[in-house]
């Protein structure tokens, strides 16, 4: 069993900010575990600008924002980074099981910071009837395919949900030569940032339908089209409002779910609706010594706020360790 003062799970902006802050606050036996082969988290696939406006007072892309922290943490003495390290188990007394290619490790942490981010809501969660053809992607997966793998997943696209990821991907598909037929939003207004509605949809004449839902998906092997209906106050379809859109691809952008199964496994009291820890104070949980920050603590709009609050988590963990 390996012993560590502080273990941080997740090497996205939250985990990196927490690591730097804990180190600056005097913790010198830190291990940062990241399941991917790179640090940076979701920022690596966000090649658009819009990051760092508040924190750096600059307009950066996601990878540029991440790079500022990667450069900072790489050479800090007493802070070790372990990539391709997937944490699969966590016990109440902070023993972690970590899977690395070819081996399992057990690590005991005196304090722990979870910075595991979010996963996306799926088609099953938006309750759409119809067939189950190929061509249905979560917006983040489509972003990874285009921006990291260099693949265009489709040519005629309908986006379900007007969150920021969906808006950004509507523009991304358009820039790659695909036709985005519509963004369909069941609510009366978007949860996305106004700047994204303007810069990603209005600037490209992409129609946005509020109070509408995709009620049926058609296609055998590949998506062929969708039915769209206007909804009333109770989200029930209004008779006579149905219209058909011909498309080969559907993107689901219907929200994010914080990744917190590990702390739930350890016995942290959870809010079942939001999948976040029940918490009286920023970044804390019902188990002393287990902290949560970034998108796994709450879904943030911009990364600058993730960094600010995660630095606080690093300081909180350092204070906790000093008190032990
Ligand atoms: C499409 C999109 C567009 C965005 N646009 C903007 C924008 O324009 N401006 C802006 O400011 N913000 C934007 N954001 C938001 C910003 O990127 C996020 O708020 C931020 O990345 C969240 O940071 P995080 O570290 O909490 O999570 P993440 O970046 O998701 O990092 C979590 C990390 O934890 C790792 N991990 C998870 N589970 C485990 C495990 N069990 N073991 C080991 N490692 C694990 C993951 O691999 C990942 O690297 C955007 C986000 C998306 C998805």
Image (cartoon, rainbow, N blue to C red):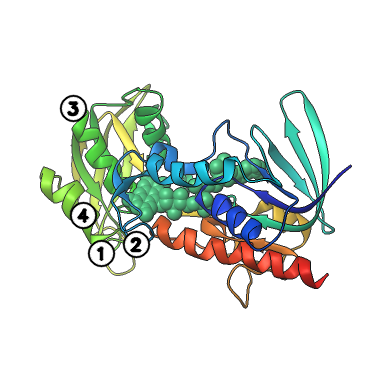
Q: Would you say the residues marked 3 and 4 are in contact, meaning their CB atoms lie under 8 Å apart?
A: no
Residue 130 in view of the camera: no
Q: Earlier in the sequence, mark 2 or mark 4?
A: 2
* Label 3 or label 2, whichever comes before in sequence order: 2
Residue at the disc numbered 4 = 197
Residue shown at 27%/28% (left/top)? 248
Residue 5 can be seen, yes or no: yes
238 left or right of 91 in image: left
Residue 55, image quadrant:
bottom left
Residue linked to disc 3:
177
Q: Secondary structure at mark 3?
A: loop
Which element carries disc 2, helix, strand or loop? Answer: loop
Front position in the image: 315 or 103: 315
Kindly indicate whether the residue at mark 1 contacts the one at mark 2 (C-beta within 8 angstroms): no
Callout 4 secondary element: helix
* Residue that sits furthest to the right in the current view: 1
Give the quarter of the image for residue 312. bottom right
Classify mark 2: residues with Cα within 10 Å, few (<14), some (14-19) or many (20+).
some
Q: Earlier in the sequence, mark 2 or mark 1?
A: 2
Alpha carbon separation for disc pair 3 and 2: 32 Å
- Tell me which label, 3 or 4, sits earlier in the chain: 3
| Label 1 neighbour load within 10 Å: few <14, some 14-19, many 20+ | few
Which numbered circle lies on residue 54?
Answer: 2
What whole-number distance in Å separates the C-alpha atoms at marks 1 and 3?
28 Å
Q: Secondary structure at mark 1?
A: loop
Q: Nearer the viewer, mark 2 or mark 4?
A: 2
Give the residue number, with chain letter if any, for mark 1: 189
């Amino acid at each position: 069993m390996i012993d560590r003062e502080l273990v941080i799970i997740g090497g996205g902006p939250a985990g990196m900010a927490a690591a730097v802050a804990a180190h600056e606050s005097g913790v010198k036996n830190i291990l940062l575990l990241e399941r991917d082969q790179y640090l940076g988290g979701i920022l690596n696939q966000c090649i658009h600008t819009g990051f760092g406006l508040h924190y750096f007072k600059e307009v950066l892309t996601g990878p540029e924002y991440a790079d500022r922290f990667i450069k900072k943490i790489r050479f800090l003495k007493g802070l070790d980074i372990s990539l391709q390290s997937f944490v699969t188990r966590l016990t109440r007394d902070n023993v972690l099981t970590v899977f690395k290619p070819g081996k399992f490790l057990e690590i005991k942490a005196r304090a722990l910071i979870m910075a595991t981010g979010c996963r996306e809501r799926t088609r099953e969660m938006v309750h759409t009837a119809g067939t189950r053809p190929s061509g249905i992607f979560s917006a983040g997966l489509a972003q990874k395919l285009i921006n990291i793998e260099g693949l265009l997943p489709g040519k005629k696209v309908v986006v379900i949900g007007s969150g920021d990821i969906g808006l950004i991907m509507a523009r991304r598909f358009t820039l790659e030569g695909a036709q985005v037929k519509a963004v369909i939003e069941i609510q009366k207004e978007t949860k996305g940032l106004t700047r994204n509605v303007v810069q990603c949809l209005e600037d490209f004449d992409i129609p946005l339908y509020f109070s509408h839902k995709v009620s049926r998906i058609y296609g055998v092997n590949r998506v062929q089209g969708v039915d769209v209906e206007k909804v009333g106050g109770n989200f029930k379809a209004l008779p006579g409002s149905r219209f058909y859109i011909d498309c080969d691809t559907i993107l689901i952008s219907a929200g994010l779910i914080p990744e917190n199964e590990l702390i739930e496994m350890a016995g942290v009291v959870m809010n079942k609706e939001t999948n976040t820890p029940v918490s009286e104070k920023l970044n804390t949980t019902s188990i002393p010594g287990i902290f949560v920050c970034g998108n796994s603590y709450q879904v943030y709009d911009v990364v600058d706020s993730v960094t600010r609050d995660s630095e606080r988590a690093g300081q909180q963990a350092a204070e906790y360790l000093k008190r032990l």
